[in-house]
Image: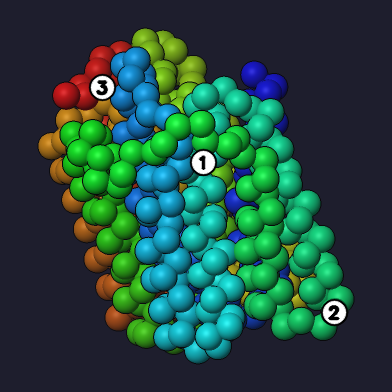
Amino acid sequence: MYKHALATALNAVATLAPQLVALVLLDPHLFGRFSVAYLVYAFGVSLTLSIVAEPWHLRSLEGSTASWASFAAAGGCVALPIGAATYGGALVVGDSPALGGIVASAVAIAVWRSGVRYFLVQQKALLRANLFDLLFVAVFAAALVAALLGGAERLFAIYLSWAGAGLLSLVALPLPTKLPHSPVGWIREYAPEIRRLLGDSLLMDIGAIFVPMLLAPLLGTIAFGTYRALSNMAAPVRLVLNPLRPQIMARRNASRAASARMFRWVLAGGLILSLAAGSVLLVIEGLNIHIGVLNSLAPYALAVAATVFCNFIGHYSYIRARGRFTTRGLLLSRVVQTVLVSVLPIAGVLAGGLAGAIIGSTLANVGIAIMWWGMDRRFDGQSDAR
């Protein structure tokens, strides 16, 4: 158990590092630009999970699995177009071609890393996974300090450190011993799982990624930076739970009593994270501490705490759902979620600007948590995956 806890902690630090540093160092305007790149990164991770990692995992639970070379190649085929999209987005928000190239490299490598680490954990190569993350954290911290002390602009320093740490951490990966599948061969082999998971993920991405992109011009760069900081404060939720996805999915058909015990731990984790997030913002506001975009988010501490808690409950229940619900069940649930996260924030922006957007987003997260918890409870103790 302690090995998995250590692996989870290291991965949380490695994945959170660029995001948390951006929250602390960047003002709302620069954080708004950073958020555009980060949204593309989030879309890439979503595609990697649905096209590469989870189809491979579900098939491996049945005793069939692809080689490391095929898995890595499939992940690369997702990461490269995401890097190209990041470059285009960077130019749109005003980054120079050189800065756009750096952030595109950082995002492409980070997307590939997300799938690779999933593979390592599922293969029980925890020592290698920990080294993978530890190298990233060490290089990121050293590069960031060196860049800032050298007088680099803060956004440039974050992007450069993110790209460099991602690249150098790859030395911890195993060398391929077989020729990989072609991208077409991978899609053909895992088509049933990809169809079920990708449709669900794309619906989720409409609300989680494309709606925020739509809100950016409505809010303006500064307000958009504050709005995206709300979601970024909930990032620890996914970074705690995503490394545990293989274990959560493997126990998706646990007995009702075992599921209840697990859910009590989930409740405790959600409360701890939500209280920590809200308290940090209250302290920042109370002591008038100037910390990047967090100052503009501090007046919304209650909304942040509620968002973090609901994200924890909802995301845990959602991970269990993906492994056992029918395609129709996932589709209907995802449609409801997409409507909530699309309609409520947009209505909030139109009614009350930034404050309305934050209230709408918080209410959407409450509704989503209730929905996924109810769906997960309904199927406790049985498998509905077909």
Q: Nearer the viewer, residue 95 or 220?
A: 95
At x 50%, y 89%, the residue is 94
Which residue, given by chain and number where applicable, does mark 1 sit on? 116
Q: Where residue 80 sits: x, y (%)?
A: 42, 61
Residue drawn at the location 18% of the way across and 34% of the way down: 192
Look at the image and name its color scheme.
rainbow
Horizontal arrangement in the rendering, residue 210 relative to residue 14 (left or right): left
C-beta proximity under 8 Å, tags 1 and 2: no
Q: CA distance from mark 1 to mark 3?
A: 31 Å
Mark 3: give few (<14), some (14-19) or many (20+) Cα within 10 Å.
some
| Pick the front one: 79 or 89 | 79
Q: Are marks 1 and 3 in contact (CB under 8 Å)?
A: no
Q: For numbered disc 2, what is the local secondary structure?
A: loop
Instruction: Report the residue marked by disc 2.
Output: 150
Vertical placement of 22 versus 136: above or below?
below
Which residue does the image show at 46% across and 76% down from the upper left?
87
Farthest right residue in view: 149
Query: Would you name the residue on which mark 3 appears?
Result: 379
Residue 206 visible here:
yes
Q: Earlier in the sequence, mark 3 or mark 2?
A: 2
Determine which of the numbered discs, if any, sits on residue 207 in the image: none
Looking at marks 1 and 3 on the same chain, the residue that comes earlier in the sequence is marked by 1
- First in residue order: circle 1 vs circle 2: 1
Q: Secondary structure at mark 1?
A: helix
Name which quarter of the figure residue 352 lies in: bottom left
> Where residue 254 sits in the image (x, y, percent)?
38, 13
Q: Left or right? Give the position of 361 relative to 238.
A: left
Q: What is the distance, in whole Å, between disc 3 and disc 2 at their CAs?
A: 56 Å
The disc labelled 3 sits on which kind of residue?
A: Phe
